[in-house]
Image (cartoon, coloured by chain):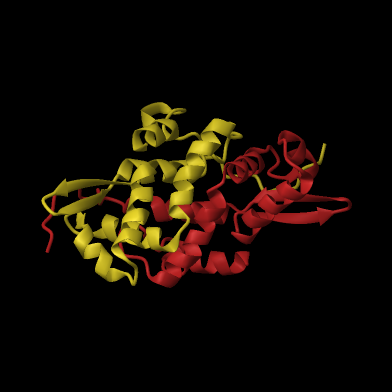
Chain colours: A red, B yellow
Amino acid sequence: MSKQELRVLGQDGVDGCCPGLLTTPLASDQAAELARVFKALGDPVRLQLLSMIASRAGGEVCVCDLTPEFELSQPTISHHLKLLREAGLIEGQRRGTWVYYRLVPETTDRLADILARPAGQPLARTPGACS
Amino acid sequence: MSKQELRVLGQDGVDGCCPGLLTTPLASDQAAELARVFKALGDPVRLQLLSMIASRAGGEVCVCDLTPEFELSQPTISHHLKLLREAGLIEGQRRGTWVYYRLVPETTDRLADILARPAGQPLARTPGACS
């Protein structure tokens, strides 16, 4: 899953950079793949989980440290983590009893590139005609 | 709606920049507001609409030019545009019969900032201990 996302997010550019959401109309297949990643970010608990994982010193968090931070069951937290993993935003590694998660920074880098204005090209905001 | 989103997206930084998704655990209220914007991006049709609006020369698109690009009804397209507008991603202006939409680049700028790695701080990816 995550490999597919990463491939699609990086398919249009050099060095894995940028389908260009703001510069070219997205094709429907690109839009479908990209929407899945944004949809994974479109939930408050998943955003909090992602920020907790990404900001942790050492770069890795045990699921055993994530669950107590929420008033949610372990299966619910695991479901949210699964959606983040399937979107290619995090990756997990089981060691013994627990799974340890870390950010996949290449995915957030690509989303940031996709949303950034093209270099040296401020987006036009002057009124145009309706043809 | 969009004013509320913009305020929350920019509340933690200087010059409207960056709650810092990757550097600090998000508070639940920040996560809720930010999730609404990402949720608006979490749909293929809305992503295509946004990219069509953002990439249009002149910076503005008549809704009359957007609808024919999709095999969807006018009310459905209008609903998607409303969600993008409520998320602060686009703004619309009625002139005569039609509404004209343009990107709010400050919102996509802020999302790009939020997702970018902190300058000079590559994210740690070394294994850590589970305390």
Q: In this view, does B31 lie above or below A118?
A: above
User: Is A100 situated left or right of A35 in this image?
Assistant: right
The answer to which of B46 and A124 lies nearer the viewer is B46
User: Is B4 situated left or right of A72 in this image?
Assistant: left
Where is residue A121? Give x, y as percent.
Answer: 25, 52
Q: In which quarter of the image is the N terminus of chain A?
A: bottom right
Q: In which quarter of the image is the C terminus of chain A?
A: bottom left
The total number of labels drawn is 0
The answer to which of A66 and B69 lies nearer the viewer is B69
User: Is A97 situated left or right of A125 in this image?
Assistant: right
The answer, for residue B128, to whether it is visible in the render is yes
Name which residue lies at 43% across and 35% down: B9
Where is residue A80? Give x, y as percent.
Answer: 66, 50
**Residue B24, picture quadrant:** top right
Where is residue B126? Give x, y as percent.
Answer: 71, 47
Name which residue lies at 37% across and 55% down: B80
User: Is A45 situated left or right of A7 in this image?
Assistant: right
The answer, for residue B17, to whether it is visible in the render is no
Where is residue B21? Give x, y as percent.
Answer: 54, 39
The answer to which of A83 and A93 lies nearer the viewer is A83
The answer to which of A21 and B23 lies nearer the viewer is A21
Name which residue lies at 37% across and 43% down: B86
Name which residue lies at 61% across and 34% down: B25
